[in-house]
Amino acid sequence: MKIYIFGNGAMASAMAYGLMDKFEVILVGRNSKNLAKFSEFKTEIYGSSYDISGKNIILAFKPYALKDMVSILKGRANLCISVLAMTNLADIKAIAANAHCVCLPNIAAKYKASTTAYYSDSDDEMIDEILNSFGKAIRVESDSELKVAGVLAGCVPAYLSVVAEALANGGVKEGLKKEISLNLVNSVFNSTSKLLENYHPALLKELVCSPKGTTIQGVYELEKAGVRGVFMDALKASTKGAN
Ligand SMILES: NC(=O)c1ccc[n+]([C@@H]2O[C@H](COP(=O)([O-])OP(=O)(O)OC[C@H]3O[C@@H](n4cnc5c(N)ncnc54)[C@H](OP(=O)(O)O)[C@@H]3O)[C@@H](O)[C@H]2O)c1
């Protein structure tokens, strides 16, 4: 099955690499020079008019370009998936299609590891099939839920990168070589991710903390610094930015 991705930026290319094992991906852009770097994919230029009739399309250009693209894209697509931030399902319906979906993936799509929040009023099974091809898709029930879910899916990799860097620096401060420290932190993220699939975070923390042990002393420092409130405030700030 063919999937036409409109755009050639970071998100478009991440999804293209994530989808290429399962689908024939065609990148459609406005500029042949910017498309030229994708030798693995077929590419097309859309010009002033482009027929989307019967196609499965993913919109991955900048949100402000939607109005212009609505007048360029002609015909009725089969499926129209948008990754445009700050864009509602109703906005996307300006492009004719049998089914529409708005989603917010992250660039881990390149490694089939995106967490993709999505909202759709269609039960078309292809939506899940496509979005789960480049990671894990999680459905929400409204545009407003998608805003918050998109922040969790899209912004948290940056928040956790700050945590990872701080912990790796901490390891160096306590005497580790920097490569070893970063390697340990990366691996611990994998370990924690696996554990979180099996335990609620509160229970996991309880399991690791022993009486008068080393972990609870570190946890106490985190609590004193108000780390929970800081993360909740960060999420609030990012969600406000997405409105
Ligand atoms: N990056 C992320 O982590 C992420 C996560 C979730 C959603 N998104 C969404 O993904 C979309 C693309 O973001 P990105 O990070 O990939 O940005 P990017 O790397 O800067 O790429 C921007 C893309 O938009 C195209 N574009 C820019 N202005 C345009 C215009 N006026 N008309 C038509 N196309 C235009 C560019 O085409 P040219 O090369 O021809 O300029 C390029 O393909 C955005 O809507 C963003 O909200 C991104």
Image (cartoon, rainbow, N blue to C red):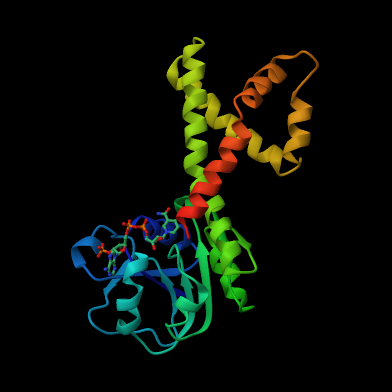
Query: In terms of image quarters, where does ligand 1 lie?
Result: bottom left
Query: What's the residue at 27%, 77% (across, down)?
Result: 46
Q: Outermost residue, right direction?
A: 211
In the rendered image, residue 197, in percent from the top left (x then y), is placed at 71, 44
In the rendered image, residue 97, in percent from the top left (x then y), is placed at 48, 84
Is residue 54 among what the camera can see? yes
| Quadrant assignment, res 43 | bottom left
Q: Outermost residue, left direction?
A: 33
Is residue 135 among what the camera can see? no
Q: From the viewer's perspective, is residue 119 above or below residue 193?
A: below
In the rendered image, residue 96, in percent from the top left (x then y), is placed at 45, 86
Query: What's the residue at 31%, 84% (across, down)?
Result: 71
Q: Looking at the image, how many numbered discs can be counted on the residues? A: 0
Query: What's the residue at 48%, 72% (across, down)?
Result: 81
Q: Between 22 and 160, which is closer to the camera in this rendering? A: 160
Q: Judge from the rendering whether residue 205 lies leftward or rightward of residue 178; answer left or right.
A: right
| Quadrant assignment, res 124 | bottom right
Q: Between 71 and 234, which is closer to the camera in this rendering? A: 234
Q: Judge from the rendering whether residue 39 lies leftward or rightward of residue 145; answer left or right.
A: left
Q: From the viewer's perspective, is residue 167 above or below residue 15?
A: above
Q: Outermost residue, bottom direction?
A: 75
Q: Judge from the rendering whether residue 25 lies leftward or rightward of residue 42; answer left or right.
A: right
Q: Judge from the rendering whether residue 31 lies leftward or rightward of residue 28; answer left or right.
A: left
In the rendered image, residue 229, in percent from the top left (x then y), is placed at 61, 36
Q: Between 146 and 53, which is closer to the camera in this rendering? A: 146
